[in-house]
Structure formats: C-alpha cells, structure tokens
Amino acid sequence: MNAALVEAFDRPPRYATFADPIPTEKELLVEVTAAALHVIVRVLANGTHYGSTGVLPFVPGVDGVGRLPDGSRVYFGVTRPPYGTFAERAVTESWMTLPLPDSLDDVTVAAMMNPGMSSWAALTGRAKFVASESVLILGATGISGHLAVQVARRLGAKRVIAVGRNPEALHQAAALGADATISLEQDPAALIEAYRKHLSESKIDVILDYLWGAPAESLLAAVAQKGFAHASHRIRYVQIGSVAGPTVSLPAATLRSSGLELLGSGFGSASLQEIMKAVGEFLQAAAKLPFQVPTKAVSLRDVETLWNSHDKGVRLVFQP
C-alpha cells in the first residue's frame, strides 16, 4: 500500500510503499479516507512524545476516518504499531470505531476529533466540569484552543477567558465565545496582574493549559495567594500540551497557599476507553451543532513537502 513512512526522527516522512496491515481476529481493516496532521502526530514522528516507541520505520497518524469492509463510514483510532493512519489502509478494533452521521464530512471529522477531544476529555473527564463554572484557556489561539473555547461554551461555562499571543487569533477566540482575552505580549509583572484580575473577577474554576513553560509559570504565580485572610477557592489546573516548554518552576508555596489542583489530560492519565467515551460525546455534540474548524485537504503523496508547513489556524488533512 502507499503510505507516509517515518524512517528517521530528524526528517519528514516520505511517501512510499509499505506492507499492508493484516488484521488479527480482533481487528478490523479500514480503508482510510482522511487523517489529520495533529500536534501529537508531529511529535510522535520526531520521537519527542512520551508515547514514542523509538522503533523505526513506522506509519504516522493516531486517528482517522475510513470505511470498514461492510462499507460503513467510521471515525477510528489505531491500536497497533507500526501502522498509523497516514496510509491507504490501517487496522483498529471495533471498540475504537464510531459510526459517522451523514451531516459531517470526512475531512471535517478527521480535523476536529483529536483537538476537540483534548478539551472535552480534560473538562468532562479530568476536571469533572459542571455547567455554570468558569474556564481559562492558556493557549487559546490555535485549532485546539479555538475548539476549547467552543467546547467550554457548549458545556455551559459561565465565563470563558482566552489567553494567547496572536492578536488576530485572540479576536477569533472572542468571536467563538470567549468573554475576555489576555495577551501574552506583555511584561511578566503586567501579565501576572492581568491573570489575577480575571482569576478574581471571573472566579475561574478550571484552567486548560496547552502551553506550559513560561506562560504557565506566570499563571501559577498569579494563582498563588498572599496572606492568611484570603478565601480558599478550588481551581483544577489541567495540563494538556507543552508547546511553550517542557518544564516549569513550581514553588511549594503556590500549592500550599491556594486551592490549586494539578491534573494531566492525555494518553496515560486517561485510559483509551475514557478517551473514546469523550470522543463519542464530542462527536454527538458536533452532529447536533457543528463546531468551527478551518481545514485544508491535501494529497498524501505530498506529505514530505507539506509536513513542516505552517498554515496557522488551519488543520491539514491528508487523503490517500
């Protein structure tokens, strides 16, 4: 079959032929119609994600859309390396497939499911979010962040605060439902003060963090309280991504002086069954009222050329 093939962690996958996957008795063969280039797909392909096996070569891609042998159209996740979804065929198990409604096309589903799941699972599964709570999204200017704004609003958030660096993307976040925005383009002291203002006025209950690194350090500093007279307020801080840096400095007093609870959301902190449950709920919500996700469909044969392209605000979807 034709597929994208990762042969080295320091260069893009190339379009090549690869052995067809042979499904076991527990697996299903899927004819892939669309697979998106998510952040996790990139970092698995360059070997820096904690889920990387370090074994080469392999086909990248963690999920996709395709048709089963009976002709039914499904969203699916992959279960067995070295086979991914950037190929003409892939294997999966029945519990990792979801039937697709006619109202959603293949490209849109492939583009939205992984980034949409990240906020849906973080809110419903990890933070145990309930309607009328307020949410701050750190890193709300990319596809995942824009979807997080929409998801928080769809789940009944009282207020949504979007934080990011790109002014145009912050404006778009506001148009998608954010009540207020905070720019990261300010000095650390001013940023901490802006965080504190919104944490207090909006009574933030949940923080979704796609950035980590320095922006998270400033936010954690803002969460820390001074003095003994302040009222305790529980804040569930859910760490999802680390595009701004892999580490932070966390003073012990930040945890002792606040109602902060640190949680992670991703493969490992949530089981695959929990993730698929969140994916199914997100898909049902999208079928009732579609989410806004800018997409660009491209040919899989162009994977090497397009792998490192940066169409900001647009999710590339490869089709065999």
Image: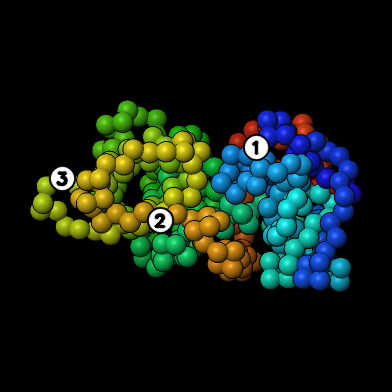
Amino acid carrying label 3: it is: Lys
Q: Which residue is mark 2?
A: 263
Against 150, is 124 above or below?
below
Residue matched to label 1: 46
Q: CA distance from mark 3 to mark 1?
A: 43 Å
Residue receiving disc 3: 226
Decide if residue 261 is in sight here: yes
Callout 1, which amino acid? Asn
Q: Give how far across and how far down residue 121 sits, in percent.
A: 51, 61
Q: Position of residue 76 (x, y in %)?
A: 71, 62
Residue 125's place in the image compared with 313, above or below, is below
User: Which residue does the image show at 71% across and 30% down from the upper left?
Assistant: 11
Dividing the picture into quadrants, the one containing residue 103 is bottom right
Circle 2: element type: strand
Query: Residue flagged by tag 2: what amino acid is it?
Result: Leu
- Percent position of residue 110, x then y: 70, 54
Q: Nearer the viewer, mark 2 or mark 3?
A: 2
